[in-house]
Image (tube, rainbow, N blue to C red):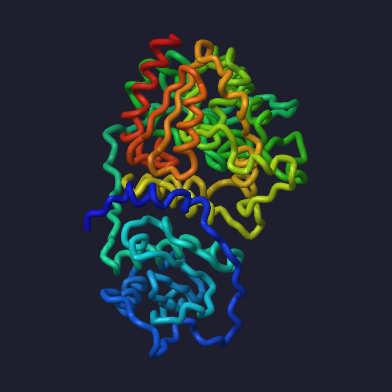
Amino acid sequence: MSVNRRTFMLRAGGAAVGLSVTFAERPAAGRAPASAPTAAQPALAGFDPRALSTLVNADPEFGLAAREWDALVHLGIDDFNYGVSVRNGRVVEVAPAGPGSDFDVRIAGPLDAWRQGFGDYGLQTAGDDADHRWPYQAAILRLAALVRETLGAPVPELLSDEVDREFDSIVGRYVYVRIRGTQYRVYFEEAGQGMPMVLQHTAGSDSRQWRHVLEDRELQQRFRMIAYDLPFHGRSLPPTTARWWTTEYRMDTQHLMDSIVAISNALSLERPVYMGCSVGGYLAPDLAYYHPDKFRAAIGINSSIAGTLVENKGKPYESRFSHPQNGTAYIGSRMYMITSPEAREAFRRETGWIYSQGGPGIFGGDLYYFSVDHDLRGKAHTIDTSRVGVHLLSGEYDPTARGPAESLAAMIDGATYDVIEGGSHFVMSDDYPRFRQYLLPVLDRVYRERA
């Protein structure tokens, strides 16, 4: 089945990161299944509940993700409603249900969204977070994918080709960096020689996202590329000289900028090129504004002039991603959802896998900068691109930054902007060949202008 996913995803907008969430009480023991059929409930033509049950129970991914899961899942497909009863990770019944039936998790949307989407793009998901959505998000996503398959919309899952080398050229080591008076042991990897370039990972992740860029042999001829793990991320452990476990982790604009400047100084880098994605993409214009003499150019992937919740600055901040019952498996599944459906499945899964290894509360703490503290309103237009180049790229499938990044670029005289067709929020990690087509012209320009 040929599907114009790009058109659908753009129409779906920010569904991937802004799903409406409601809470439902956990069903009482012994309650009748929500899937119990009634004579008045119509059936959806072409949808076979028994085939779905067989497909789900034979699916190894669902079997792994749904272990020990007992749930009543309500499917809303147009005006048709079905109840899926899951017991100990296996579907025991799929049957028509009433629109007001009890549920632990509900996934609903128009038939178009079911047939053309990915993950739960375009669908509304509701339910019990602590007992169901957080621990079993991967199972919920897989169930939605299998429903799509029964509706005639299978999604190809392409793996990667083997590489043609025995060793990568990337070399990793640690450097001791003092940030705001505290000494950190910061891990970094590097490859190449020439103009220095530092690479900032996304919120709650680490430098492994940049492995494809670092291993680009053509770029290695002109750039000394350095990808680091911020303290508390990846292989950069928390400090050993502070009682960090007594304070909630939270990243703000000044702390983030101080960290990148300190790491660059510790490595004796002379005005490196800066490139970052997501949180790192937001940071690009901040560095161009506050530190134009410390960087030759700032390249932001999926940037914005301000955070989506910037008006909440000064108010109590809480993130569901810092909730003690919200594990990193949920975060990894959510980030997998905003990879590109046109990318190879192996690299989409790898992106989610890296996220599933973050420290508790770190992703939510990074989102304080991303959502609340980043704010260049009334300032961005004064950035002087004769001192520091500004270049912005946005993934076409990215639901958070395309419009804001375009508006930001228009405010900065001399800045460049482009949309990566088919690219996602994590385009450098889930689809590097696609990203490379848009990155090379930017780096060619930076090299010519700033060498």
Residue 339 visible in the picture: yes
Query: Measuring 22% from the left and 58% from the top, which residue is drawn there?
Result: 1
- Looking at this rendering, what residue extends furthest in the left direction? 1
In the rendering, at what x and y percent does residue 124 appear? 48, 62
Residue 344 visible in the picture: no
In the rendering, at what x and y percent does residue 360 appear? 63, 49
Image position of 228 (left or right of 365):
left
In the rendering, at what x and y percent does residue 6 appear? 33, 47
Which quadrant would the C terminus be assigned to in this image?
top left
Query: Measuring 60% from the left and 57% from the top, which residue is drawn there?
Result: 326
Image position of 380 (left or right of 418):
right
Give the camera-side residue of 269 and 285: 285
Residue 209 to residue 183: above or below: below
**Figure label count:** 0
Residue 445 image-quadrant placement: top left
Query: Measuring 42% from the left and 75% from the top, which residue is drawn there?
Result: 90
Residue 129 to residue 177: above or below: below
In the rendering, at what x and y percent does residue 275 appear? 48, 26
Query: Measuring 32% from the left and 80% from the top, which residue is drawn there?
Result: 50
